Image (cartoon, rainbow, N blue to C red):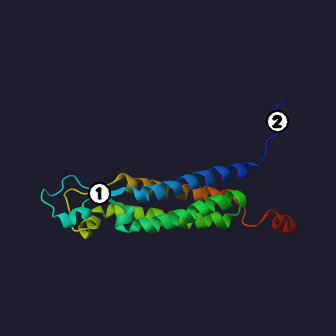
Amino acid sequence: MSTPPTGDFFEKARAVAASILFACGAAAVVGSLLDWVTVRAQPPDVPDDQLHRLPPFSGIEIGDGWYVIAAAVVVLVCAFFIVIRGRSRYAWLAFLGCIVIGGISISDYRGIEELHLSLEAIGRDPRPGLGLTLVAAAGLIGLAASVAAVAASPSQPNDQRRSTG
């Protein structure tokens, strides 16, 4: 005999979307702490007082990593509330957080040369680091997961839908 299914399809879809959002938020936090800019060659004679300015630079050192971490915390909290409360407002808030994460990371990814020039152009041939790539992927995957969470979540609590419908 088969056992009856527990929960409906939308509850399962919400749980999967929230799990993906949680993973994306965690990946964005970790990516902010990893290297965002790497260079191929560094100058041979760097003064001792400038050694702390040598790449690779993390997202925290660049400054945009703090905004990504703040948006990632919003995504993590919203993923928790999507599972607990099951409301679409938390999915929309996670969507906005993923827009911030993706926007910052893609902007920095495309402008890696300008970002490197603003850090006094130490080294040659700047390239995006692993952290920036991880944050960009987290933002894009999080967008898809938050849209899925919006589609699987009701806009009203269950008791209000029953009384009006």
- Farthest residue in the front direction? 48
Q: Is residue 121 visible?
A: no
Which quarter shows the C terminus? bottom right
Residue ID for mark 2: 3
Along the line of sight, the residue nearer the viewer: 32 or 110: 32
Q: Quadrant of residue 96?
A: bottom right
Determine whether the residue tagged by mark 2 lies in a helix, strand or loop.
loop
- Looking at the picture, how far across and down is residue 1, in whole percent? 84, 29
Which numbered circle lies on residue 56? 1
- Farthest residue in the right direction? 163
Label 1 CA crowd tier, 10 Å (few <14, some 14–19, many 20+) = some
Left or right: residue 140 compared with residue 127: right
Determine whether the residue tagged by mark 1 lies in a helix, strand or loop.
loop
Tell me what residue is drawn at x 72 percent, y 66 percent: 155
For residue 64, above or below residue 35: below
Amino acid, disc 1: Pro
Distance from the alpha carbon under mark 2 to that under mark 1: 55 Å
Label 2 CA crowd tier, 10 Å (few <14, some 14–19, many 20+) = few
Amino acid, disc 2: Thr
Tell me what residue is drawn at x 48 percent, y 64 percent: 69
Tell me what residue is drawn at x 22 percent, y 68 percent: 120
Instruction: Give the mark toward the camera: 2 or 1.
Output: 1
- Looking at the picture, how far across and down is residue 18, in whole percent? 62, 54
- Looking at the picture, how far across and down is residue 153, in whole percent? 70, 59
| Mark toward the start of the polypeptide (2 vs 1) | 2
